[in-house]
């Protein structure tokens, strides 16, 4: 006969809801009925006593949650991993449980201070003894899992809880005899659900509904074929019966007010040491360092938030606070994740924020060769717009040709690292993989810019972000001032206009900018060319007379006529030469020798002879013209602006004008001060901009 199962329970004499540390307690302060709780607790104990032996620990005054003995610790064989409570309200329980376990002959293991772990509330043995399921996300820290694996010599599978109602693993996950599992999948993140599905075959997974989950059906005690729980729907009951279990319901409503059910009220003391167990955990950690205006810029908060959001957890190992307004702070952070894959993702994002490897972890980047032309090794590092450095043989090499969505190819002999597009990879190229030995150099935020050049000063004042309509005038003042400066210094302004510029009457203003030396390159599509030329040749834009604002008879053919005329001439420059094209944006470009590139698209009519329908060539053309840009003016074209944004490294001023705030936010959200969004009509914007520039020119003259 199998040895009798033993449970530890704590009488509810001191039980109450005295504080709020989970969503169930909210609104329930002092609501539980003392008699009701005592009655329900005794009923549970009597039920369990029929199938198991129940031992008691005396309740303690001021510790109302001690009744939930599942959180005393995790017992396996003669070892117990004692709980280290997250909330100060429960920490007083630790010494009483420690004393009890010591007295009862258990070998006690204790978590280091500040490493929360809440016992069998967050760690459940697979009932076939194959592994320990351990939860994290609300109460227990992920870093406690490798310690459990080591102390108990067992494989630990880490599961991330994401619904605050199910703050402990045992509130939503209940391994049953013979490899069955009762659980509520929505309480876990996608990665954890995948782990569960890999381990437990679909036929053995009993999924509970949200209603059953909120009645704590998963917070059940399983002894042999008996399952004791607060409540289960008829559907769940029959599902359990079909699996060969007998469900015994015992009302525990008074304890639900505290967020606990049958399982929380008990601790299994007879958890046999698994025969086939061995130390194993997939939890991985890395130490990272962040430096800068960590608190006032919100950088630290963002870094920690993204760690948690991506399924990891963190510990701040050291923190040095910059005390003066101008001084920087530094933090050393240990980031842990349930797998190398998740950790790499988190570290990659942290590196984007400017984190570097901690002092003990500086290693070279890993490089893998390309074995198929145009195809990178699987785990390649995807580049961002931020200046990046790669550690090769102990030396940090700056990455050249920085752009977004590329990979980094390293030439170890030449000590060179450069960004390349996937399609340009050659067999034998050595590509950076993973996130070791990689760092990005983030531009300092506003405060440091105050000491910088006048141009930097101006943009610092402008700040990143999207304007409201009220701020448009102010922004235009600042943009015009900047453009005037750049022209004065022989800098480079690249304009990316969409056809809306013409429809809104902005064409003449853009032409003025080109004529007066404010544009050094123009990047667009077939549409801006077509509509500008239609306007110049026929006075309409898509058949609408721009002066009258009315449709012209037969106007719908106008854009085709414009394309046809230019095709007959053999191109835009030739049309200018032949005196056919005598005004407009492209006329000015030809006259002033301003390079332009028109990238084709599936919806293009014609196209114009200059429109590059080979998109790889078009991208190369764009990249060539963007080189050395000081300012890029994106004017109401989502398609081309996104393309340009991806090719442009951080540090180049971006001004994005669009009537749709969502487009502006997307394009100007580069996490830096150098981009600014203006939500307004592009025709009005250009009108205002040229007015301001005229004034500046007059002052100069
Ligand atoms: N005749 C043609 O050949 C033809 C015609 C149209 C488009 N196209 C092609 O289709 C592709 C996409 O064209 P796209 O760039 O026009 O479209 P898009 O959707 O990428 O961008 C248009 C943008 O303009 C914004 N906008 C609309 N009205 C505005 C206003 N009054 N002020 C400020 N912003 C305003 C919109 O919010 C949108 O973000 C391009 O390749 C283009 O060349 C070709």
Image (tube, helix red, strand yellow):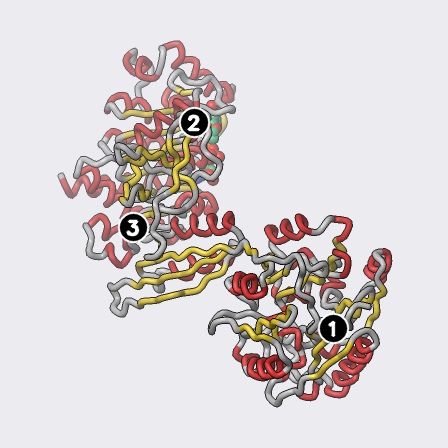
Secondary element under disc 1, as helix, strand or loop, is loop
Residue sitting at x 66%, y 73%: 70
The CA span between labels 2 and 1 is: 59 Å
The answer to whether any part of residue 269 appears in the image is yes
Crowd class of label 3 (few under 14; some 14 to 19; many from 20; radius 10 Å): some
Upstream in the sequence, badge 2 or badge 1? 1
| Observer-nearest of 230 and 485 | 230
**Which one is in front in this view, the residue at disc 3 or the one at disc 1?**
1
**Do the residues bearing badges 3 and 1 touch, measured as CB atoms within 8 Å?**
no
Residue that mark 1 sits on: 262
State the residue at coordinates (17%, 38%).
488
Q: Decide if residue 251 is in sight here.
A: no
Q: Residue under circle 3?
A: 443
The N terminus sits in image quarter: bottom right
Using the image as rendered, state which of residue 245 and residue 109 is in the foreground.
109
As drawn, the residue found furthest toward the left would be 701
Q: CA distance from mark 2 to mark 3?
A: 30 Å
Q: Nearer the viewer, residue 48 or 28?
A: 48
- Disc 3 is placed on an element classified as loop
Q: Where, by quadrant of the figure, is residue 241 drawn?
A: bottom right
The image quarter in which residue 424 lies: top left
Mark 1 neighbour density, 10 Å: few (under 14) some (14–19) many (20 or more): many
x then y, percent, for residue 101: 61, 79
Give 39 or 566, whichever is nearer the viewer: 39
Q: Residue 28, image x and y in percent? A: 66, 79
Q: Which residue in the rendered view is the most extreme toward the bottom?
A: 61
Mark drawn on residue 423: 2
Q: Is residue 533 above or below residue 392?
A: above
For marks 2 and 3 on the same chain, the one whose residue lies earlier in the sequence: 2
Which badge, 3 or 1, is on the more N-terminal residue? 1
Give me the C-alpha separation between circle 3 and circle 1.
Answer: 55 Å
Residue 431 point in image, percent of width and height: 39, 35
């Amino acid at each position: 006969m199998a040895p009798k199962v033993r449970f530890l329970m704590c009488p509810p004499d001191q039980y109450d809801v005295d504080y709020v540390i989970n969503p169930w307690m909210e609104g329930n302060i002092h609501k539980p009925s003392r008699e009701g709780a005592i009655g329900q607790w005794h009923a549970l104990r009597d039920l369990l006593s029929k199938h198991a032996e129940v031992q008691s620990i005396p309740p303690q005054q001021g510790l109302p949650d001690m009744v939930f003995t599942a959180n005393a610790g995790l017992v396996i064989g003669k070892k117990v991993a004692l709980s280290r409570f997250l909330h100060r309200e429960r920490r007083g329980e630790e010494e009483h449980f420690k004393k009890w376990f010591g007295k009862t002959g258990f070998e006690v293991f204790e978590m280091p201070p500040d490493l929360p772990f809440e016992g069998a509330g967050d760690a459940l043995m697979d009932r076939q003894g194959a592994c320990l399921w351990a939860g994290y996300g609300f109460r227990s820290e992920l870093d406690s899992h490798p310690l459990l694996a080591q102390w108990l010599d067992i494989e630990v599978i880490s599961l991330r809880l994401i619904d605050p109602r199910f703050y402990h693993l045992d509130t939503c996950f209940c391994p049953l005899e013979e490899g069955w599992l009762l659980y509520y999948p929505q309480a876990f993140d996608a990665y954890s659900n995948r782990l569960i599905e890999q381990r437990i075959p679909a036929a053995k997974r009993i999924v509970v509904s949200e209603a059953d989950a909120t009645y704590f059906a998963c917070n059940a005690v399983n002894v042999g074929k008996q399952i004791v729980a607060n409540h289960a729907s008829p559907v769940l009951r029959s599902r359990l019966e079909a699996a060969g279990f007998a469900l015994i319901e015992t009302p525990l409503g008074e304890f639900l007010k505290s967020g606990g059910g049958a399982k929380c009220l008990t601790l299994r003391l007879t958890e046999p040491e698994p025969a086939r167990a061995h130390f194993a955990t997939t939890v991985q950690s890395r130490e990272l360092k962040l430096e800068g205006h960590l608190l006032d810029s919100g950088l630290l908060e963002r870094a920690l938030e993204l760690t948690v959001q991506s399924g990891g957890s963190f510990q701040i190992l050291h923190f040095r606070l910059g005390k003066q307004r101008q001084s920087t702070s530094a933090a050393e952070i240990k980031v842990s994740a349930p797998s190398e894959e998740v950790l790499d993702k988190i570290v990659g994002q942290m590196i984007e924020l400017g984190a570097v490897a901690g002092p003990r972890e500086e290693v070279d980047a890993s490089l893998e060769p390309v074995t198929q032309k145009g195809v990178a090794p699987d785990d390649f590092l995807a580049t961002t717009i931020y200046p990046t450095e790669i550690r090769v043989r102990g030396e940090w090499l700056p990455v050249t040709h920085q752009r977004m969505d590329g990979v980094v190819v390293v030439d170890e002999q030449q000590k060179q690292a450069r960004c390349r597009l996937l399609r340009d990879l050659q067999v034998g190229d050595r590509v950076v993989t993973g996130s070791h030995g990689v760092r990005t150099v983030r531009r300092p935020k506003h405060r440091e810019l105050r000491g910088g050049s006048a141009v930097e000063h101006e943009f610092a004042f402008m700040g990143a972000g999207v304007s409201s309509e009220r701020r448009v005038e102010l922004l235009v003042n600042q943009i015009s001032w900047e453009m005037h400066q750049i022209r004065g210094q022989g800098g480079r302004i690249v304009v990316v206009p969409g056809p809306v510029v013409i429809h809104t009457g902005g064409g003449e203003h853009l032409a003025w900018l080109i004529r007066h030396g404010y544009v050094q390159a123009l990047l667009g599509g077939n549409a801006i060319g077509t509509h500008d030329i239609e306007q110049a040749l026929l006075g309409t834009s898509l058949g609408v007379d721009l002066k009258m604002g009315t449709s012209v008879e037969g106007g719908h053919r106008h854009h085709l006529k414009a394309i046809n005329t230019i095709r007959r001439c053999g191109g835009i420059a030739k049309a200018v030469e032949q005196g056919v094209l005598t005004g407009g944006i492209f006329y000015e470009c030809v006259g002033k020798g301003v390079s332009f590139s028109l990238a084709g698209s599936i919806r293009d009519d014609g196209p114009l002879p200059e429109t590059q329908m080979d998109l790889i060539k078009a991208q190369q053309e764009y990249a060539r013209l963007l080189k050395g840009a000081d300012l890029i003016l994106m004017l109401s074209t989502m398609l081309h602006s996104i393309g340009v944004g991806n090719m442009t490294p951080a540090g180049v001023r971006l001004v994005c004008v669009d009537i749709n705030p969502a487009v502006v936010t997307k394009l100007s959200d580069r996490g830096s001060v150098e981009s600014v969004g203006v939500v307004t009509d592009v025709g009005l914007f250009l009108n205002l901009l040229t007015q301001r520039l005229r004034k500046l020119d007059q002052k100069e003259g």
